[in-house]
Image (tube, rainbow, N blue to C red):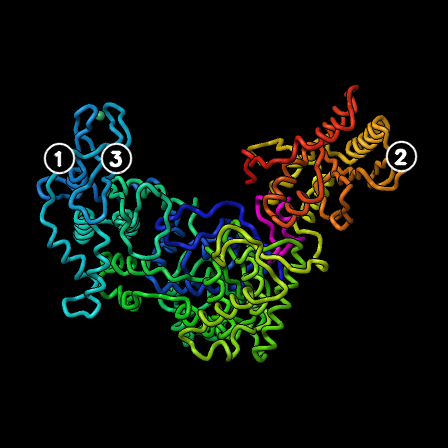
Amino acid sequence: MNVPYIPGTDSSPDFPLGRFLPPIPAGMISEWCRQNLALGNWVLEPFGFNPLIPIEIAKAGHPILVAANNPIHAFLIRVLASAPQKGELTAALQDLAIAPKGDGRMEPFIRSLYAVKCQDCGRHIDADAFLWHKNEEQPYAVIISCPYCGATGEQSLTPNALDSLTPLPPVQMHMARALNRIADRDDPLRLQVENALNAYLPRPILVLQTIINKLESLRQTPRRRQLLIALILSAADRGNTLWAHPTPRERPRQIVIPSTFKEVNLWKALEDAIQTWQFLDSPVPVWDWDGTFNISTGIVVYQDRVKELLPSLQDVPIKAVVTTIPRPNQAFWTLSALWTGWIWGQTAVTPIRQLLARQRYDWNWHAHALSVVFHSLQDLIQPEGHFCGLIAENEPSFLLAALIGANIAGYRLHSFANSRDDKIAQCIWKPEIKVSNLPEDRLRLDADHKLKSFLQEKGEPASYQQLHTALVAGLAHDCQLAIPVFTENKRQMTSDIQRWLDDILLSSAYLYRIPDKTTSLETGRWWLRDPSAAMTPLIDRIEALVIQHLIEADTTTSENLKTDIYSKFPGLFTPDNRVLFNCLESYGDLIDQERHHWQLRPSEKPAARAADIKMIREQLCQIGQRLGYHILDQDPLLWREAGDTTLEYRFHILSTALLAAHFQEEHTGSTRSIFVVPGSRANLLAYKSQRNPVFAEHLEQNYLVLKFRLVRDLQANPLLTRELFEKQIHVDPPEYRASQLALF
Ligand SMILES: [Zn+2]
């Protein structure tokens, strides 16, 4: 089940409306296609929640059919794939800027609504944004960047300054229009729309409705019209109150007005949007679905639910489903309905009206909804086809809902990988007729076995989310999430299974929660009561592989290292960036910061380290003799009181931080067990202690850590006594310092 995690080559693109799109790193989908599809294979994207997916698939040489029920998603795909360039976006906005408004033109009219007086120089300027406290009648401050005196930042709004703001023209008409474009007076959804409109202050409503109203009389080519709408859509999102201040990168899921928020200058928002719509240099062809599979490249958009696609398909050549699994987002779905109505009118809202009707979503509902869609996909893909689903912003409930949905729909989780850094789970499902039907007690035994094996293979404690992931992925792999004991009550199956899983964790006799300060189930770490069958800790195996990788490669990049390590530690065991980085930094030098090129540090070369170890051993022998001990020059090196068989000092001389392998030895009261390591290992050791409390406790209780340098100093000290030696070996324990360098 565990397969190598496919990392992206770049971060998630900064798309328009990006805070509502599932974040997928660039390059991830292309690489999946390269590994799994032949050129020209048809792909289906049943949700269309992130335009990056169809664009990357099409660019990788596969025609792709996207079912995008939400008109906003469909629009994003169409426009971003058409590769708008700066010149045409600017021209589209210019059409609006010079359009007549009253006695003047649109741009000066809109800008006048944001006119303020700079408090430093007294000149009239355009505000960048107003700052508001929730439920207040007036903004409390303004953000400016004064072109005259250079003043920037926040200026508070005095009563005088508030009086000098441009009075707003009456907005009732615009409010009514904003409402009527979505729901008529007798529409049962009218109340929901009214509530959603609370996310807009009067000034943005006035600006947006004035602009949208103007669209009807504006003479533009269809292309210019499309691009202007794109910019308006960006402004419509910038214009709502869901922009908490000063927290800039929030990803809202509910329409909840923050206690302090920013109202941006919408003319500036239109100008800024020009940048965000420029994603591609050259266009990817986009067609509307015509019921045939006659094209060989590009994106085909079906603007409806994927379920509706089914009857129109014959001789389907679809080889794969590739998608990012949707998660409930009431804020985006509601806003989508508003924007769709404003721009394209009431009829366009029809397909997503049900999103307005449903104001509360829970994971039970979501698992069921996903299962319905997944089920319909079975008839759309070829029997040997792949179903690749990415779970972005992965969290236990979301993963569980998606895996339950798939199991119910008759899909087995065939392979799985997840990254904690990306917060993405990569799932491959295959249709499976056979559904497991274990009775609950057998299932419980099976679940126990899964948890135990996971921890044994990890070789170190795991977080709640890691255990949860291992368990639900394991159950989904065996088609055990959809068994009747769980799914009898569809309205609470996700909650029921969740409770069952938590109960296993809390009541299992073979696990314990490592005590920490919190009582929440989701924090803290868990470990085996009897770890005798556990493998070497994961981080030690990774460290060994990093050393090997650096020795074999003349120079390497962090990307190459990742690929190598991910292939050897797949699926549930995909290491965190911090683990990789701490191992890499311990042995390697960053020789090219721009391109992230790394090289084995000359002092870490095997021959150099072998020579160090030989020398340190000789020096320890000499020190021991000078202090009058009997030396047993073996591995570990031993010092004994002459004529006595009781051990005094035991030295493990290592060039690595691979200590855990030695932890099995016995410790008696009179023996000092000491790891002697290069100073460059100290940080990695300290990191291991910080990360793994079991390791930390073992190390602290039973061992001392000595750096090579100290051995050299002690050997060179002519006044060394037994007392001084004993004192000195306690003074310099490893402490963790987080690096300033970045891995990627
Ligand atoms: Zn000024």
Q: Which residue is mark 3?
A: 143
Of labels 1 and 3, earlier in sequence is: 3
Tag 3 secondary structure: strand
Residue at the image position 18 percent from the left and 51 percent from the top? 209
Of labels 3 and 2, earlier in sequence is: 3
- At label 1, counting other C-alpha atoms closer than 10 Å, the crowd grade (few under 14, some 14-19, many 20 or more) is few
Residue at the image position 27 percent from the left and 68 percent from the top? 357
Displayed quadrant of residue 245? top left
The label on residue 640 is: none
Q: Is residue 83 left or right of residue 474?
A: left
> As rendered, which of 491 and 252 lies closer to the eye?
491
Cα separation, mark 2 vs mark 1, equals 89 Å
> As rendered, which of 344 and 283 lies closer to the eye?
344
Tag 2 secondary structure: loop
* Residue type pointed to by label 2: Ala
Establish whether ligand 1 lies closer than 8 Å to the Cβ of label 2: no
The N terminus lies in which quarter of the figure? bottom right
* Residue type pointed to by label 1: Pro
- Up-down relation of residue 666 to residue 595 (above or below): below
Of labels 2 and 1, earlier in sequence is: 1
Give the farthest residue toward the top.
718
> As rendered, which of 382 and 612 lies closer to the eye?
612
Q: Which residue is mark 1?
A: 159
Residue at the image position 15 percent from the left and 55 percent from the top? 175
- At label 3, counting other C-alpha atoms closer than 10 Å, the crowd grade (few under 14, some 14-19, many 20 or more) is many
Cα separation, mark 1 vs mark 3, equals 16 Å
Establish whether ligand 1 lies closer than 8 Å to the Cβ of label 1: no
> As rendered, which of 225 and 718 lies closer to the eye?
718
Q: Main secondary structure of the magenta part?
A: helix
Q: Which residues are magenta?
A: 558-578
The label on residue 642 is: 2
